[in-house]
């Protein structure tokens, strides 16, 4: 299990199970075509007959790095990342990078199982409902289980101009802690820099140069129970307090 900064939505989880695959040779024989061959073998094993693509990606542990995406319906979803083992890893291990070669790949097992079974929400993998857990014992296609209706809250906050989806996801996870299972997704709908805001908005938000106004959409939908309006508002306020860096606070729970 690994812990990382990431977006919060139906295909991401902050603490995924990851498998790392390494193929190491004591000769310089391995090359980028071997990476492509490895991808084909992996995708066929995990998602038989799936359409896939490999796009350039930068990793600290590879050269010629690639991100492996698979086609799911009308969208491409990331399955794994890979590349040639970076020379400095061999050197750090006391091996001659000119003599040794290797392939490296990392894949999230949660995402792989989700895609293989056609599960619509990654949180279902860890649900305690017996109707859900019994389906995780095999690779048969997912049979839908009734989900409760969502509760949405839109939040306008003042944040640093460098704010993005990953920072958003990281801070929300810290703020909610054990209540994360109540959260289906958090979306960054819009980010408007100080210079682009009208004067009235600047005055209302008391925003400063170097900051931005972010519009965040919080979708709450526990898998096994229904939230009250007060519970939803308290979660909204906790997210707001954790993210907002403006002088004016707008809390709604009572």
Image (cartoon, rainbow, N blue to C red):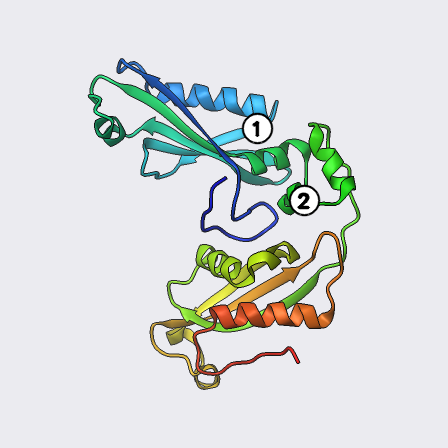
What number is the disc on residue 79?
A: none
Single out the mark in the foreground, 1 or 2: 2
Label 1: how many residues lie within 10 Å, few (<14), some (14-19) or many (20+)?
some
Q: Quick one: 197 or 181, which is closer to the camera? A: 181
From the image, tell me which residue sits under label 1: 51
Image quarter of the C terminus: bottom right
Q: Residue 126 sits in which quadrant?
A: top right
Q: Total marks drawn?
A: 2
| C-alpha gap between disc 1 and disc 2 | 25 Å
Q: Quadrant of residue 161?
A: bottom left
* Contact check, label 1 and label 2, Cβ < 8 Å: no
Which residue is drawn at the image coordinates 34% and 19% (left, top)? 24
Kindly tell me whether residue 219 is visible in this rendering.
yes
| Disc marking residue 124 | 2
Q: Position of residue 1 (x, y in %)?
A: 50, 39
- Which of disc 2 and disc 1 is earlier in sequence? 1
Residue at image x 77%, y 41%? 130
Q: Is residue 226 left or right of residue 64?
A: right
Per the image, label 1 sits on a secondary structure element best described as loop
Towards the viewer: 56 or 80: 80
Q: Would you identify the image quadrant in which residue 57 lies? A: top left
Q: Say what secondary structure mark 2 lies in.
A: helix
Looking at the picture, does residue 200 appear above or below residue 10?
below
Which x, y percent locates residue 81? 44, 34
**Label 2 environment density (alpha carbons within 10 Å; few <14, some 14–19, many ≥20):** some
């Amino acid at each position: 299990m690994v812990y990382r900064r990431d977006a919060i939505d139906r295909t991401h989880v902050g603490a995924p199970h990851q498998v790392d695959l390494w193929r190491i040779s004591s000769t310089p024989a391995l090359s980028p075509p071997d990476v492509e061959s490895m991808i084909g073998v992996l995708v066929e094993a995990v998602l038989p007959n799936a359409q896939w693509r490999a796009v350039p990606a930068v990793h600290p542990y590879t050269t010629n790095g690639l991100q492996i995406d698979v086609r799911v319906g009308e969208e491409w979803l990331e399955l794994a990342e890979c590349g040639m083992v970076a020379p400095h890893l061999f050197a750090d291990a006391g091996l001659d990078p000119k003599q040794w070669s290797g392939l490296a790949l990392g894949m999230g097992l949660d995402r792989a199982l989700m895609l293989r079974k056609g599960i619509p929400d990654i949180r279902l993998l860890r649900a305690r409902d017996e109707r859900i857990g019994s389906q995780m014992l095999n690779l048969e296609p997912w049979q839908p289980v009734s989900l409760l209706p969502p509760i949405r809250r839109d939040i306008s906050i003042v944040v640093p101009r460098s704010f993005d989806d990953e920072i958003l996801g990281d801070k929300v996870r810290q703020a909610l802690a054990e209540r994360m299972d109540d959260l289906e997704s958090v979306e960054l709908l819009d980010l408007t820099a100080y210079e682009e805001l009208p004067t009235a908005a600047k005055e209302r938000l008391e925003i400063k140069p170097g900051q931005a106004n972010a519009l965040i959409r919080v979708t709450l939908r526990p898998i096994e129970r229904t939230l009250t309006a007060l519970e939803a508002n308290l979660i909204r306020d906790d997210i707001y307090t954790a993210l907002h860096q403006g002088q004016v606070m707008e809390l709604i729970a009572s």
